[in-house]
Image (tube, rainbow, N blue to C red):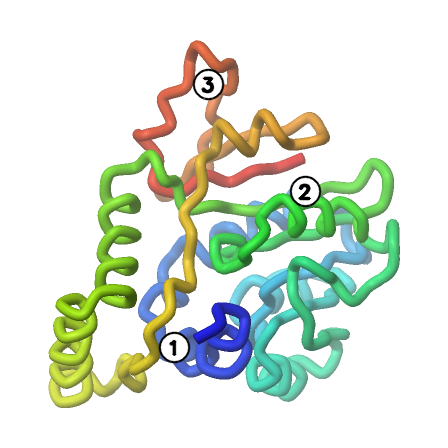
Amino acid sequence: MDRKKYQRDYYANSWIHSKHRDTQYNPDIGKFILNLVIPDSLVCDIGIGDGLPIAQILLESGMNVYGVDVSPKLIDICKNNFPQIDCKTGNAEKIPYGNDMFHLTYCVNTIWYVPNTMKAINELIRVTKPGGMIVFDIMNQYHVKISKLHRRLIFENTTMLGKGQKIIKNIVKKVLFPKYGSPNWHYVVDQTPLYPDLICKMFPRDIRLFTYNNSFIEINEKEPENYKFEKYSRIIFGS
């Protein structure tokens, strides 16, 4: 199945029931973003989902929140949850807003689902005002656990043995763990961890890097001879 079609038509159910949406990281990065802008700023959430919790935090703190998500179902839920948010169906590679519109544009828990990362990053820059900020996070391909999870994703969705293993896992999930949503019967590699050093080299603006361990810590290892990115499973870029 096409990756974009899967994200548009099927991923919504997985995200709504995902245990990852309830981690402390999400409200914490909402507060982290909040500290980068002043009240009444225009901010845009790329991959807004149903608006919880990041867009909600910014909205309740006096920001003018806009949002984009590839899933029409999630956009409908977001509009119902937060009528004040101007949100649209769209994707990070072609954001449906004009140039130089937002004081801050962010893309959290999302960019590893986008097929063309640099196209998405350039879109974040395009819709952000000159002097404004962008924030996005990545899953780090250099991290052992992330790399292992990605290899398993490829195995379970592209090989006969892996597909058989996925069927067994889905049956177990349906019987024993129904609260985590419907089993995923689709065979698609829908995520791509990224190499942070390559993003640093390709990024067209000055950039700061952070990692998260119950709080946000700036990484000061951006010079090529000092790359030690394998320590960090997730890296947050701010520019």
Q: Nearer the viewer, residue 7 or 52?
A: 7
N-terminal of the pair, mark 1 or mark 2, is 1
* Distance (Cα) linking label 1 and label 3: 35 Å
Task: Work out which quarter of the rendered image holds the C terminus and state it.
Answer: top right
* Distance (Cα) linking label 1 and label 2: 30 Å
Q: Residue at x 24, y 44 (%)?
A: 145
Q: Secondary structure at mark 1?
A: helix
Q: Residue at x 23, y 47 (%)?
A: 148
Q: Which residue is mark 2?
A: 36
Q: Give, as a three-letter code, the residue at label 2.
A: Leu
Q: Which residue is mark 3?
A: 221
Q: Nearer the viewer, residue 72 or 5?
A: 5
Q: Secondary structure at mark 2?
A: loop
Q: Give, as a three-letter code, the residue at label 1.
A: Ser
Left or right: residue 209 versus residue 75 is: left
* Distance (Cα) linking label 3 and label 2: 22 Å
Q: Give, as a three-letter code, the residue at label 3.
A: Glu
Left or right: residue 179 versus residue 131 is: left
**Quadrant of the image occupied by residue 81:** bottom right
Disc number lying in front (1 or 2): 1
**Quadrant of the image occupied by residue 4:** bottom right
Question: Local crowd at mark 3 within 10 Å, few (<14), some, or many (≥20)?
Answer: few
Q: Residue furthest front?
A: 160
| Residue 151 percent location from the top left of the image | 25, 51
| Residue 120 percent location from the top left of the image | 65, 51
Q: Residue at x 49, y 34 (%)?
A: 210
Q: Nearer the viewer, residue 63 or 191?
A: 191
Task: Work out which quarter of the rendered image holds the N terminus and state it.
Answer: bottom left
Left or right: residue 32 versus residue 90 is: left
Indicate whether 95 appears above or below 172. Answer: above
Q: Which mark is residue 14?
A: 1
